[in-house]
Image (cartoon, rainbow, N blue to C red):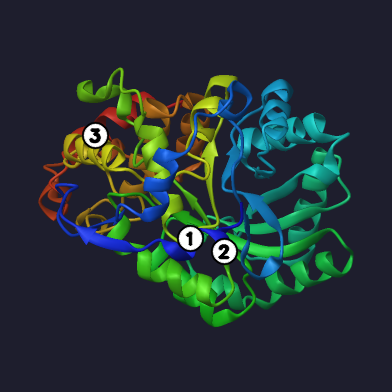
Amino acid sequence: MSRNSSINRRRFVATGAMGLAGASLVRAESQEEAEQQKSPAESPAERSPKVRRYNTLGRTGLEVSDVSLGGATEASVLNYALDRGINLVDTAEQYGAGEHEKAVGRAFKDRRDEVVVITKHVHGLGGPITRENVIERFDASLERLGFEYVDIAMLHHVADPGLFHNEELLGAYETLKKQGKFRHLGFSTHDAEAVIPGAIESGVMEVMLTIYNSIQYPERSELIAKARKAGIGVLAMKTMAGRAQDRVAELVNEKRTFSQAAITWALTDPSVDSVLISIRTFEHVDEYLQASGKTLTSHDREVLATYNRAVDDSFCRIGCTECEPSCPHGVAVGDIMRFGMYFENYGEQKVAMAEYAALPRERRASPCERCDGPCLKACPHHLAVPERLRLYDRMLRIV
């Protein structure tokens, strides 16, 4: 089923039903949903989890599954996902110090033509950008993958839109593209408001990966709509808003899980081409694919509202830096809160600890042990920021 055949019949309404400051995006009960409810019972084969919708990824022309794959390292899980129709896989140079790229390459070495591959590289944080370094690192990624090319090359964790005009960087990617080593250029960002307008203005970005969930919706919808109108393919990440559902008692034993509701919510937006989500087990594949091609229901909205109320005063809005200027020590508050989320809720302890270790020492949270916490007053969401930073400094510290 393509988006054009269904999504143009859907409309969106703003509502206060999420119990949050500001409106949240929900889909009105549609004629399509009513028709789905009246349809004959599906056979067991039809009920088995599989991709039910593919969308065209912006102006790239690539047809991608609406639920996409990140995180898995086991070849059996990766191939199971592909067998169920998930055809977009995301990796990065920094994931497991290149080990994730190797895992993806091993899993799909005989199925390369069936999968759309993204790999990502961080630029501009470790010193001046040079064409030689960019090309060398990209070639190293291809060697780890064992592929001659990737479909999408991404600038990773972009915080400075000036990267979209860096001659050394763009020159390197132009060379790589001419060599046939990638087909489309994109970026990922946790700083949507600062970065997406620059990406649109540059005219060189074809795909973007950004945070989008029912808590952070008001700060994202208009931006991604503008990006999609400009022909940029939109991939949504962090759709589960902290992934803390196991800590919400009311959501235990829910027949329709929070994760499915959260994925469906993001896919309800016509600007979103696919949700990119960490899938590490066969059970994850089956669970998340229940959201593919589905309509957001009133029960989904209730599940989201329950979750959002439960985490509203504990969820650090990734990409928000409101409190950082108040810190007298220059602590990387937003990054550390994100690493803590990976550790506590994503089961990515090694990744979180490695990310924290990579922070310059002066940006880590050690000073928080003896600070009275001006960030607490500066947080617009009243989070216990100093307490969390002290906890994460102890939790994430390797050396």
Residue type (three-letter) at the residue carrying disc 1: Ile
Asked which secondary structure carries label 2, the reply is helix
Could you tell me how many numbered marks the image carries? 3
Eyeballing the image, is 391 above or below 295?
A: above
Crowd band around label 3 with a 10 angstrom C-alpha radius: few (<14), some (14–19), many (20+): some
Can residue 121 be seen by looking at this rendering? yes
Q: Which of marks 3 and 1 is nearer the N terminus?
A: 1
Residue type (three-letter) at the residue carrying disc 3: Arg
Q: Position of residue 307 (x, y in %)?
A: 24, 35
Mark in the foreground, 2 or 3: 2
Eyeballing the image, is 44 above or below 306?
A: above
The label on residue 388 is 3
Mark in the foreground, 3 or 1: 1
The answer to whether residue 161 is left or right of residue 148 is: left
The residue sitting at the top extreme is 253
- Contact (Cβ within 8 Å) of mark 1 with mark 2: yes
Residue type (three-letter) at the residue carrying disc 2: Asn
Residue at 48% over, 35% down: 357
The label on residue 7 is 1
Residue highlighted by disc 2: 4
Residue at 31% over, 28% down: 245
